[in-house]
């Protein structure tokens, strides 16, 4: 039952008040938009980044200027020691993590015949193993607290494949298996795990792509925005709105892939 002060969808202006959220790769693009969105909903946000210190500081400043709370932490999410140290630092400061968004990702595109082993490995190391490392470190806290939300940013190329992206699509497809296994493992402790699959979103990652053939294939006829992905992440993080959703892959792709 809901009261008039609490809408049925459970998304009040500050539905994440008092929650601590870690967003990996939050200095730019989609991660930045997710950090701003979760902070606007009341969460205290840890802005993870790997190299872009100034950009991460700008995200923190933007959140503070809007009356929110955030701080930045540098960690290469593909490195176990740096992930473990980041989580220890968050625990020192807050004693908890309520929301984890595994967003950090890279592309190293190339046709398979010519793909360098290093380009295969680095994409798998960050996009898939990074999610494993962060989830393993954070889920210990969530399982103990008997609650939490984990949201993994995959991609529609995990569902449809893409020439020149064997490494990226394999990593993103692996992320879907990881999401479902973790959802099944953690459900009894009230921790939900879902994947968000963006289509083509305007960002630095897609800036060099030839837009014309892509736009033709998208029923809504345009690229998506980082804010449109962030809105879904906020919904999945909100309580009680998304409490009964777990193990799902939700697409934000303008209708590109209809299953
Ligand atoms: P982006 O603009 O290139 O930003 C990537 C972010 O990941 C940056 O904040 C970057 O931090 C961070 N990062 C890179 N390497 C890292 C590492 N080793 N450890 C921690 N953080 C690291 O990418 P985006 O387009 O926003 O994409 C964000 C996510 O959405 C990715 O997982 C991507 O695969 C997925 N996605 C994007 C699209 C799209 O159309 N853009 C579509 C589907 C899925 P630094 O700035 O410090 O390097």
Image: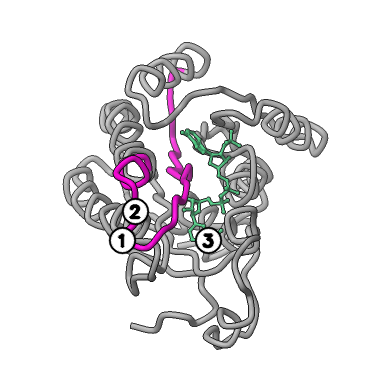
Residue corresponding to mark 1: 112
Residue 189, located in which quarter of the rendered image?
Answer: top left
Image spot of residue 249 (x, y percent): 35, 64
Instruction: Residue at 32%, 47% (x, y): give it.
Output: 120
Vertical position of residue 231 compared to residue 151: above or below: below
The CA distance from mark 3 to mark 2 is 34 Å
Displayed quadrant of residue 168: bottom left
Residue 232 shows which numbered tag?
3
Give the mark, 3 or 2, whose residue is nearer the N terminus. Answer: 2
Q: Which residue is mark 2?
A: 115
Which residue range is magenta in the image? 95-122
Give yes or no for residue 29 being in the magenta stretch. Answer: no
**Residues at discs 1 and 2 in contact (Cβ within 8 Å):** yes
Residue 204 sits above or below residue 25 on the image: below
Secondary element at tag 3: helix
Identify the residue at image location x=22%, y=48%: 187
């Amino acid at each position: 039952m809901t009261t008039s002060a609490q809408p049925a969808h459970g998304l009040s202006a500050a539905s994440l008040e008092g929650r601590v959220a870690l967003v990996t790769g939050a200095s730019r693009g989609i991660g930045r938009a997710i950090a701003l969105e979760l902070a606007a909903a009341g969460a205290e946000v840890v802005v993870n980044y790997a190299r872009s210190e100034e950009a991460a500081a700008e995200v923190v400043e933007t959140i503070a200027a809007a009356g929110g709370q955030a701080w930045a932490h540098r960690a290469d999410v593909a490195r176990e020691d740096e992930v473990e140290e980041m989580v220890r630092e968050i625990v020192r400061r807050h004693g908890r993590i309520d929301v984890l968004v595994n967003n950090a990702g890279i592309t190293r595109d190339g046709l398979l015949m010519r793909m360098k082993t290093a380009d295969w490995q680095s994409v798998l190391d960050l996009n898939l193993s990074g999610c494993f490392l962060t989830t393993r470190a954070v889920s210990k806290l969530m399982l103990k607290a008997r609650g939490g939300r984990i949201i993994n940013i995959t991609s529609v190329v995990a569902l449809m494949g893409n020439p020149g992206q064997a490494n990226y699509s394999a990593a993103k497809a692996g992320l879907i298996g990881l999401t479902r296994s973790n959802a099944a493992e953690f459900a009894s402790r009230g921790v939900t795990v879902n994947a968000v699959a963006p289509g083509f979103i305007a960002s630095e990652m897609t800036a060099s792509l030839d837009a014309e053939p892509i736009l033709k294939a998208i029923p809504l006829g345009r690229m998506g925005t980082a804010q449109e992905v962030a809105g879904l992440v906020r919904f999945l993080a909100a309580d009680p709105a998304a409490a009964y959703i777990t193990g799902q892959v939700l697409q934000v792709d303008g209708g590109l892939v209809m299953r």
